Amino acid sequence: MSRTHRLTLAVLVAVTLLATGCTMPVFAPRTTGDGSAARGNTGAPVWKPCPEVPQDLVGRGAPGMSYDCAKIAVPGDWNTAGGGGAGASSGPDGTFEIALMRVRSAQQRDRIGSLVINPGGPGGSGIDTAAYLSFGPAFGGLPDEVTRRFDIVGFDPRGVSRSSPVKCVADADWDAAFGYEPDPKSKAQFDGLVALNKKIGEECAAQYGGRLRLYSTEQAARDMDAVRAAVGDSKLTYLGYSYGTLLGATYAQLYPRNIRAFVLDGAVDPRQDLVAGSESQAKGFELAFSNFGEWCRKTSAKCPIGPDARAAVTTAIDKARTSPVRGSDGRAATPGWTFYAVISSLYTESGWEQLAKAIDNLRRGDPAAVFDLADEYTGRGEDGHYSNLFDANLAVNCADAASAPTIDQIRGLQSTWRRKYPLFGPALAVGMLSCATWPGQRDPYPTGAASGAPPVLVVGTTGDPATPYEQTPRLASMLAVGVVLTWEGEGHTAYPQTRCVTDAVNRYLIELAVPPAGQRCPAR
């Protein structure tokens, strides 16, 4: 699997991990909380071939696969939209366009329906992910058993990529944010980061005003039911990764009787607040980094910064504080950029060797590999422009946050977490400044049972840094219909990386056969 593919699928985080803080109109049938459909809907998406999507991403389409795209329109605010049938008013907040892509195998037979994909983030493109996954198991994509039975449908949630994208942060501000000191110890450094967060929030408020609250997960979950209706499925089959598990869990509470099968991989616990979620990630990344260090100690041939990788990385970040190495374009490999290169590499075990080589190159005076890793994570292009991944990440996370700690509380947590999680704790603490200073209104998602839903498969990885494993049983318990499948592996998300996990998920998706309670899959 290519580095770009792995990052698209796995690097998208569930809680903000920022130095600053990711056709014809068709309305879905309005539904009530029990999932029953409201009065009719006569629209249908107009599908048109779009082979340019995989062509632009990887230079070609997958053999035997066709690609078709469409757009549907959804109310800006589902709570104020009128009616729900044909000709219904969109409400005072207008509409959003939701972009879809349908991938269909020429070998398809005994079609079950559509498998709708969300890669996480928030801010990840489901369309891009569907294109990557179409390339099959040889490239880390979906198994042939699945693509033969389902259309693969990716959608970009509202505010993301092709779906009425939110774009309100200047490239220079993202450069400043990601390059900033990840542990600003002095008052001047900390105050500078607070000011940068406020500036970014003000930029977004000036552009979107009261509409910022409309990028919430609950609104996106209601859009997902519009996607279900648009593809013609009476019940939804869904594969959600990372933040996509939160989106799926929200849908399951709103529309429990509209579910056929849900796989939630890399589980987020919806009941944790911003502080608990950030601390959970700090703990998870420390564990993943310790595992990387142990690998480095045992695998010296592949790890030029061994035997003490932690000391090598810490030294590299410390040196960047006083004498950052500059790239060929003059860009400085500051502590922030080095830190995000580390973060980028920890989402998959296969990224460990790249991290070791990047840090070794950096201490030899070449920062190119550090920048490559950091840029893949942040969405920064070679031209210095950013995708809207983190704009969306910021807007969604802060709309979702029912509350945020104060600036003074964050300052205290920075110190406390530095002692508990020395490499990642301070950055995860100050990352909460983004929502602490956010000017938009809040629209928190529900956190209850999916009463009336069929069994939902919740997949967790014991070495997951971004959504630590303890969140897996918590999500399953909250939904009350969750069935846990455990992978004793490393990295963020599990399907379809090992035969044990793949077989269990395939049987569930195709046959609705739920794995035995407590099933655990070995690392290899």
Image (tube, rainbow, N blue to C red):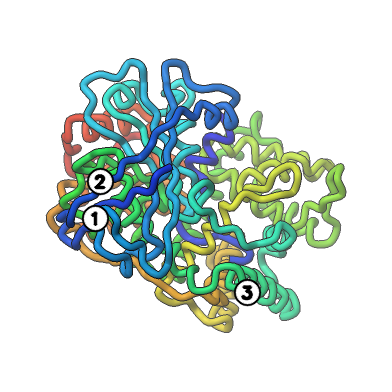
Q: Residue at x 50, y 53 (%)?
A: 164
Q: Secondary structure at mark 1?
A: loop
The residue furthest front is 87
Whether 357 is drawn above or below 404: the answer is above
Find disc 2 in the rendering and name its residue: 42
Where residue 249 appears, as percent x and y from the top left, is 29, 55
Where residue 228 appears, as percent x and y from the top left, is 28, 44
Q: Quadrant of the C terminus?
A: top left
Say which amino acid is labelled 3: Glu
> Residues under labels 2 and 3: Cα distance?
41 Å
Q: Residue at x 31, y 68 (%)?
A: 79
In front: label 1 or label 3 = 1
Whether 208 is drawn above or below 225: the answer is below
Q: Residue at x 19, y 42 (%)?
A: 234
Say which amino acid is labelled 2: Thr
Find disc 1 in the rendering and name its residue: 85
Mark 3 neighbour class, 10 Å CA radius: few under 14, some 14 to 19, many 20 or more: some
Q: Are marks 2 and 1 in contact (CB under 8 Å)?
A: yes
Where residue 423 appears, as percent x and y from the top left, is 61, 59
In which quarter of the view is residue 237 placed? top left
Observer-nearest of 129 and 235: 235
Q: Are marks 1 and 3 in contact (CB under 8 Å)?
A: no
Q: Residue at x 50, y 37 (%)?
A: 128
What number is the disc on residue 202? 3
Task: Judge whether residue 342 can be spotted in this image.
Answer: no
> Residues under labels 1 and 3: Cα distance?
37 Å
Observer-nearest of 502 and 173: 173
In front: label 2 or label 3 = 2
